[in-house]
Amino acid sequence: MRPSWQRKDTGLVVRMILSLAILSLLYIVFLSILAYLGLGFIPITIIASIMILSQWYFSDKIVLWSSGAKVVTRDQFPELHDLVERIVARNNIPKPKIAVINTRMPNAFATGKGPRTSVVAVTTGLMDILDPEELEGVIAHELTHIRNRDVLVLTLASLFSTVAWYLMQFGFYGGLYSGGGMGYGYGSGGNRNNNGAGAMIIVILVAMLTWIISFLIIRAISRYREFAADRGSAQMTGKPIKLANALMKISGTMRHIPTRDLRQEEGLNAFFIIPALSGSTIGNLFSTHPPVEKRVQKLMEMEASMS
Amino acid sequence: MNLFKRLKRGSSYYSYKPEKDDSDAIFSLSSAYITLETKLDLKSTGKAAISLKSVSGTFFTEMKDDIHRFLDISKSDFELLHNIVSDSYGYLWVILNGKRIEDLIAGISAVGEIINDKGFSKQLLAAIFEFKNNSKNNHQYLIYNYNLNKFYPFVPVSSKKEERGNEDEMKIMATIVDEIPFERDVTLWYPLWDMPL
């Protein structure tokens, strides 16, 4: 039987649909409350669609620009191009553009609207510390993000929380100045001014709630998709342990394995230092990436299931 | 866990005896060993050891004699050869040699209990089990640390350069981390270079 990680990841599809459904439901509820409170449907739609389209259209440019990544040609980085081509050829996926960020920090990311227009970016620091097979694991991880259309999913998901955030602020200031004629009730009849303050509070509360919920959902999706991308990388390269090594190198775990002899350590009496507490679950709830040790453990399990 | 064992645990709750936990932990290696063998192709080299800090005095010498005597007598029960040596750090090593991992586990656990009974449990450093991967031809170790009451891996690559095989160590961790008491904090994986095994 094939190890479970080599089979199709139905969990991902289910979660994707489910979380998008929850998000859109929240979106609709939020918009209908706004509409109920008197803000015209057309202004809301226009605001929402402008934001969606612009964020979507400029997503890759924004990411590349803000990270300082430069798209590089084959002449500039021939080995990197070869390495990416090897992976895409083996796995029958379109070759992305390749970008390099000039920094010592080892990191990599993928961005783009679809498999054909996406960009994989790596830092020079990453290329320095990883050997080719480990770099292959990292790039395959990013290619899986592209193949799974994670950028689209997370853009849509975070878009919702962004909209909620703006409206929350708008509602807040609107509430402050409602006496001055800047309230939502503008143009929809004088009777709205009476319950304007109460309505503002409801808007703020609902917006806050939707923002918090969508924030947590985004983080849950994002963490799950990291595991999915690790699995995809393992399938593409067939060497999960190389990605595990890369993760340990990037996070500095390898450096933390001591080389000083236990007997020396006992002599110094330094051994009785209380070991650091392991990460709390609340911390996990708010982080977008799962802890490295969990990812490494899953990758090692894949490696073990192959032999 | 069977009822008898659970009752034993329950009764010893108030008079806390760490040595029972130590032998429980060491015995859990017998099932984890099967996992190591099937998943990582690691086989016992037939060597295991227990290491403790030497102290001067007749009680310590008596204890050494007891260990010798016990291992001589029990030769009919477990097929174990033994050897006691000292290292340059001033640690005493009781080295066992036997074909079956079960015998090594039982032997190490029994020696640990003798050391405990003689009042030297504070001196106990570690129990070490040696493995080998036939295709890689390197030695890989599981170290049971008596202070942590946990196992962790050690794969020496070069003792001169103090270089260790982190990749193999992480593999061992991933394979048996849920089967035995395992130290998840890698910063506590102190190595033992140049073991006299």
Image (tube, rainbow, N blue to C red):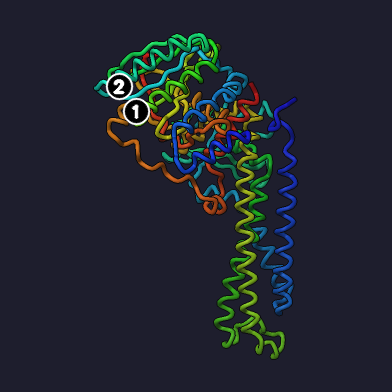
Residue A72 placement (x, y as % from top left)? 53, 36
Q: Which residue is drawn at 70% across and 74% down?
A: A34
Locate the C terminus of chain A and report the quarter of the image it occupies: top right
Same subunit: marks 1 and 2: yes
Which numbered disc covers residue A248?
none
Q: Nearer the viewer, residue A5 or B141?
A: B141
Q: Which residue is drawn at 53% across and 10% down?
A: B99
- Res. A129 image quadrant: top left
Residue underneath mark 1: B120
Earlier sequence position, callout 1 versus callout 2: 2
Q: Which of A46 and A244 is in front in this view?
A: A244
Q: Which of A198 and A93 is in front in this view?
A: A198
Q: What element carries label 2?
A: helix
Q: Are marks 1 and 2 in contact (CB under 8 Å)?
A: yes
Classify 10 Å Cα crowding around label 1: few (below 14), some (14-19), many (20 and above): some
Q: Which chain carries label 1?
A: B
Residue A258 placement (x, y as % from top left)? 38, 31
**Is A204 positioned to the left or the right of B25 in the image?**
right
Q: Is residue A265 above or below residue B195?
A: below
Residue A235 placement (x, y as % from top left)? 66, 30
Q: In this view, does A173 lie above or below B197?
A: below
Q: Which amino acid does label 1 sit on?
A: Phe
Residue A18 appears in the figure: yes
Residue A16 placement (x, y as % from top left)? 71, 49
Residue underneath mark 2: B60
**Is A181 positioned to the left or the right of B68 in the image?**
right
Q: Mark 2 lies on which chain?
A: B
- Res. A30 image quadrant: bottom right
Q: Which amino acid does label 2 sit on?
A: Phe
Q: Nearer the viewer, residue B23 or B131?
A: B23
Q: Residue at x 71, y 63 (%)?
A: A26
